[in-house]
Amino acid sequence: MTAKFIIGIDLGTTNSVVAYAPYLGEAPQIQLLPIPQLVAPGTIEARTQLPSFLYLAPPQETAAAQWDLPWQSGREFAVGEVARLRSAEAPDRTVVAAKSWLCQSRADRRAAILPWNAPPEVAKVSPVTAAGRYLEHLAVAWAAAWPDAPLAEQHVVLTVPASFDAGARELTREAALAAGLPPQLVLLEEPQAAVYAWLDQVGDHWRKLLKLGDTLLVCDVGGGTTDLTLVGAAEEQGELVLRRVAVGPHLLVGGDNMDLALAVHVAARFQEQGVTLDPWQSISLWHSCRAAKEQLLAEHGPAVHPITVLSRGSRLIGGAKTLELTRDEVTALLVEGFFPQTSLTAKPVKRRGSGFQEIGLPFEQDTAVTRHLAAFLLSQAGSASLSGAVEKEATTAARPTRVLFNGGVFKANALQQRLLAVLGEWFAAADSPGPRMLDGAHDLDHAVARGAVLYGWSKQRGGVRIRGGAARSYYVGIESAGLAIPGAPRPLRALCVVPFGMEEGTELAIPSAEIGLVVGEPAHFRFFSSLTRKTDQPGTALLRWTDEELSETDSLEMTLPAAEEGTDDYVPIRFHAKLTELGMFELWCVSATDARRWKLEFSVREE
């Protein structure tokens, strides 16, 4: 059956969105899919966003059919708006930030670990399962709206953070396939999707808004993460084209941190009134502050918003307690706390309160987005793909000339203006006022899903494409030969097998000497990636590196089959790398002595 639609899905940390356009037509007519969801027990409403929250109900609520939907009864969970509301009342039964867990390689992301630190009576789920629950709900919403156009037969583009490594992408794809999305779905980086949404808004006029040599900073601050990307305007065959030239690290700082900061502020105000909150109430307050922030910072939001804390037993005498937050109070707290004025050379603070750290998500110690941005721009100094560099305080940094904001945080105009002011201080010169915001960006809540549709349209029907390829370089760890030393591992060298910018749909043989591949017994295969080593070519071997240059990604523990039992324990091979049209990496180990081939994927796929 021929696809009828191009569908863009934004699987967000805080909210998920579906946009679509008919496949036929002269230009994409992008629309948003209304998503039916519970907003209260037994009450269903259709909204354009599905909050990415999963509530795990106790047995008594399941028995009472509180969370049943017309298409499913006996539900032991709820997703969407009602789950978001329940997060304030039952935080220990609500999964949040499941998407961020997908890139936490220190945890088993297929294990039932969420909600993190939930009590034993809660039947936990894995991050992959949680992400799948959101996508399942979106799939059902699509089926209800378009029963004659099965989702599995459409062109689907699913967005992921630009900073997701290959393992996190593979886990996202796994959750998507389990939810009924098509195997040929394409993954797209969210900042690129934001640029495509802007292109959809401004049309062919974009070539007048961006000029040759411009470097566009896409600053995407969402509910749980911050994504930083640089896109350059270059020339190919006499035409202006866009090329993604740099991607920042996965930063776990965003709107959730702002909500918590407000909660701490409000808790202190309650304390001044003689009201002490217990841990349950503190977590509930955190979720309540989210709603207050969204209301107060909205374009036509109120000047004040009430915050109420419910009583628990005798801890709060006289029942619920309420106080008011003002718009000015919230704006000042968030601007100075998350976008402070800082120098270009200021580094993010990495302080530790204790030598022992709880295992969980690697949240940033420093909440200052401006310091993380400075570190990102400094890390990209000297890149030949960028429009230029600026000398500042005895150092160089990549210099953006335009800024595109994305993410719900930037619906607050005060935060946009502060970031622009900081960039102006860093890069303003006599002949330039500093980076300027791109005009034409609207609807930050739905931009990523809309942009995913335009990307899918351009890929299928032709149109403006952002060139980018692999967002990072990838390496395999190879144990060096040599004399063994008791208690010490042999030195490891890293061999580049996927260069930065390798285009989708391409493959290449990796030039190197023959490598011994361990077969017939359990072996540990180690992989590394880099966001900054963008000039390494396939076959480049690194004998030493810093943690800032290379980070270890998902490893594999597996036994590769031997030709016959009792034969050699290793086979001489050469590497062959492939980046599929769908954006997935494959590394083939090709025998140098016979026709055998083994596939090692940069993922945590279990064989």
Image (cartoon, rainbow, N blue to C red):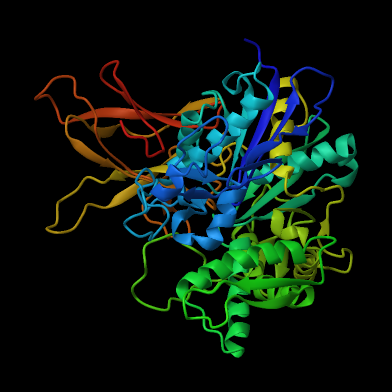
Q: Is residue 54 above or below residue 254?
A: above
466 on left or right of 496: right
Residue at position x 84%, y 68% in the image: 429
72 on left or right of 360: right
**Residue 80 image offset from top left, x and y in percent:** 59, 46
Residue at position x 40%, y 38% in the image: 603
Could one spot residue 315 in this view of the protein? yes
Q: Is residue 283 above or below residue 379?
A: below
Q: Identify the image quadrant of the C terminus.
A: top left
19 on left or right of 173: right
38 on left or right of 558: right
Could one spot residue 540 in this view of the protein? no
Q: Identify the image quadrant of the N terminus.
A: top right
**Nearest the eye: 107 or 209:** 107
**Residue 508 image offset from top left, x and y in percent:** 48, 27
Q: Is residue 194 above or below residue 174?
A: below
**Nearest the eye: 333 or 41:** 41
**Nearest the eye: 72 or 334:** 72
**Residue 599 image offset from top left, x and y in percent:** 35, 27
**Nearest the eye: 469 or 397:** 469
Q: Residue furthest top?
A: 1
Q: Residue furthest left?
A: 566
Q: Which corner quadrant of the image does residue 26 belong to?
A: top right
Numbered label tally: 0
**Residue 581 image offset from top left, x and y in percent:** 56, 26
